[in-house]
Amino acid sequence: FTIESRRKKGYRLVGRSDQLTENDILALLNNALADRERGFGKYDITTDEKALKYLAVIADGDARRALTALDVAVMSQLKHEGSEKITLTTDIVKESVQQKSIQYNSDTHYDLASALQKSMRGSDPDATVYWLGRMIAGGEDLRFIARRIAVCAAEDVGNADPMATVLAASAVQIAEFVGLPEAQLVLAQAAIYIACAPKSNASAKAIWQAIEDVKAGKTIPVPKHLRDGHYKGAKKLGHGVGYEYPHNSPTGYIKQDYLGQGHGKKYYQPKDIGREKIISQYLQKLHNQLK
């Protein structure tokens, strides 16, 4: 069941919402139990009103916390009873909430996120999926998990395997669309793919260095031939004059100055890994052709 995906059903929450009353929480829980499409309506669930009241109280105004606890309670009973007929008593709900906690506090939140990203970066799919499981079981916000996976794809895999970023971006959208429990499958696929992909941080290092130079005051005037020449009077200023259109060359490349004379710093240095090896060879080929 997802609380991130459907605004029209009243389940969408952005981060931590404004404090809701216990009655508000109870209404959300009952809606979740009745909703056959996005909730638990397809199951035969008998609930103790005291159990729902307990969830509303411990949620402390946080709908995400209440709905996550309900999800854990229902899923645990499905596994335990092995059928779609479920009885939720106060004791069962309390036990599920206690199991869900797993010492998941603010410190654990960042520690587990760090462990997940470092495991993906370190090419360990087993550790990756374990830490991912810890975060999901602890009730972590799916969007937070998806963001960490997407960032790792861009930072630690980069152009060594561009498909990693594409897959991560898709996982972000699909996880929000399908919600739990199915979202865990999408996130696991993306995280494991990233863990198993060739690694390069060349793109990340390139933008970090460029921003560092700009902040250090190394601002370079835009060369005149690269400036916008599509306005009246541009040519008189020399704007756009001398620019050569690369596609006029059979190779699709024409050597010209893009950073300004004396500023030929090499920011992007692709590694000889994965797809970046092909990129490196291509750039070297262009360089050799024009010697």
Image (cartoon, rainbow, N blue to C red):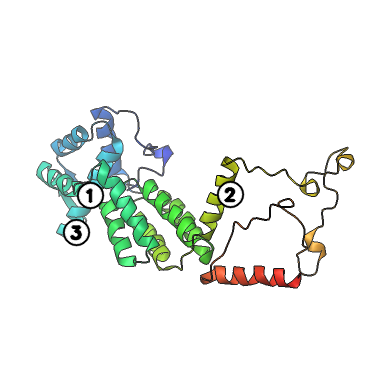
Q: Earlier in the sequence, mark 2 or mark 1?
A: 1
Query: In the image, what residue occupies the spot 16% across and 49% down?
Result: 99
Q: Which of the image's four quarters has the C terminus?
A: bottom right
Query: In the image, what residue occupies the spot 27% across and 60% down?
Result: 130
In percent of width and height, residue 143 lies at: 39, 47
Q: Which residue is mark 3?
A: 79
Q: Which residue is mark 1?
A: 72
Q: Which residue is mark 2?
A: 210
Total tally of numbered discs in the picture: 3
Query: In the image, what residue occupies the spot 55% across and 51% down?
Result: 209
Q: Are marks 1 and 3 in contact (CB under 8 Å)?
A: no
The image quadrant that residue 174 belongs to is bottom left
The crowding category of the residue bearing disc 3, from other C-alpha atoms within 10 Å (few below 14, some 14 to 19, many at least 20), is few
Horizontal side, residue 152 vs residue 38: left or right: right
Q: Quick one: 253 or 25, which is closer to the camera?
A: 253
Q: Quick one: 202 or 98, which is closer to the camera?
A: 202
Does 155 appear above or below 2? below
Q: Quick one: 190 or 257, which is closer to the camera?
A: 257
Q: Earlier in the sequence, mark 1 or mark 3?
A: 1
In percent of width and height, residue 193 lies at: 42, 65
Does 105 appear above or below 255? above
In what element is the residue under mark 1?
Answer: helix
In what element is the residue under mark 2?
Answer: helix
Residue type, label 1: Val
Query: In the image, what residue occupies the spot 80% across and 58% down?
Result: 245
**Whole-number angstrom distance, CA of label 2 to CA of label 3:** 52 Å
Which is closer to the viewer, label 1 or label 3?
1
Q: Visible in this render: residue 161?
A: no
**Whole-number angstrom distance, CA of label 2 to CA of label 1:** 46 Å
Residue type, label 2: Ala
Which is closer to the viewer, label 2 or label 1?
2
Q: Visible in this render: residue 278?
A: yes
